[in-house]
Image (spheres, rainbow, N blue to C red):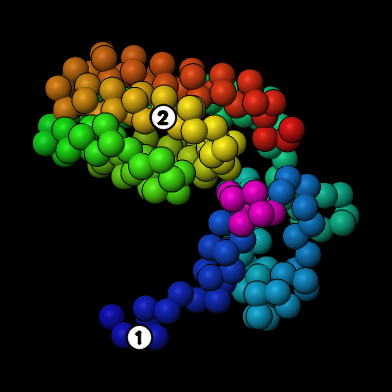
Amino acid sequence: MSVIEAVPRASERAYRTLRDEIVRWELRPGDALAEIDLAARLGMSRTPVREALARLVADGLAVAVGGRGLAVAPMDLARVRALYEVRQALEAQAARLAARRGDPAVFAALAAELAAAPSEPAAYYDLVARLDAAIDAAAANDYLTAALTGVRTHLERIRRIAQDDPARLAAAAVEHRTIAAAIAAGDADLAAHATHVHLHHSLDNVVRTGGPAA
């Protein structure tokens, strides 16, 4: 690959930057996404910014606001509950398939890492992302993976609510370890049940903390 090919296109850089800012709540629900202002801030022309915004709309991270352009999509408790309804079905099935098809050694190693999960949120979320990726790979179902990818885009925003709650992060690490251990043991029913329990507690935490709009 040439150096030129290795450098992301301007539209891709704009997309990644804006997506990350939305996920990290640096751009909050309802914040305006003005093409001219964003182009100036990102140091690029309006065309790649326009392309990036179109992708964010397709992702559901940006929405049209009447005739006033685009804004960061809302994320209220009703939307969170709807996402979790979909997440429950998809992730439980993915865990079940991973237990049947996955390499036990991969998940045993992840379970061991989760037993000593980092307390720093960013490092912990990276570890969870690796578990998600391992489950997706083991499930070996492209349609399921594509559906989960879309849901997780929004869930990354929701996860940030737990960052300031060390107790919840510690409990979530135990729950993720249980999922990984069940998959390593090849126990599909336990893997699906452990996933269900984790997601129940995760949603309860969002509701308890007042939700992302609070």
Crowd band around label 2 with a 10 angstrom C-alpha radius: few (<14), some (14–19), many (20+)? some
- Residue at (44, 38) in percent of width and height: 147
User: Visible in this render: residue 130?
Assistant: yes
* Residue located at (61% from left, 64% from top): 52
The span picked out in magenta is: 21-27
Q: Amino acid at mark 2?
A: Ala
Residue type indicated by callout 1: Val
Between residue 154 and residue 210, name the one nearer to us: 210
How far is mark 2 from mark 1, CA to CA?
A: 42 Å
Residue 25 lies within the magenta run: yes
Which residue sits at x=79%, y=56%?
A: 32
Q: Is residue 28 left or right of residue 175?
A: right
* Residue 146 seen in the figure: no
- Residue pictured at 16% horizontal, 33% vertical: 108
Q: Quadrant of residue 10?
A: bottom right
x then y, percent, for residue 152: 48, 40
Q: Is residue 122 above or below residue 85?
A: below
Q: Which residue is mark 1?
A: 3
Label 1 crowd (10 A; few <14 / some 14-19 / many >=20) = few
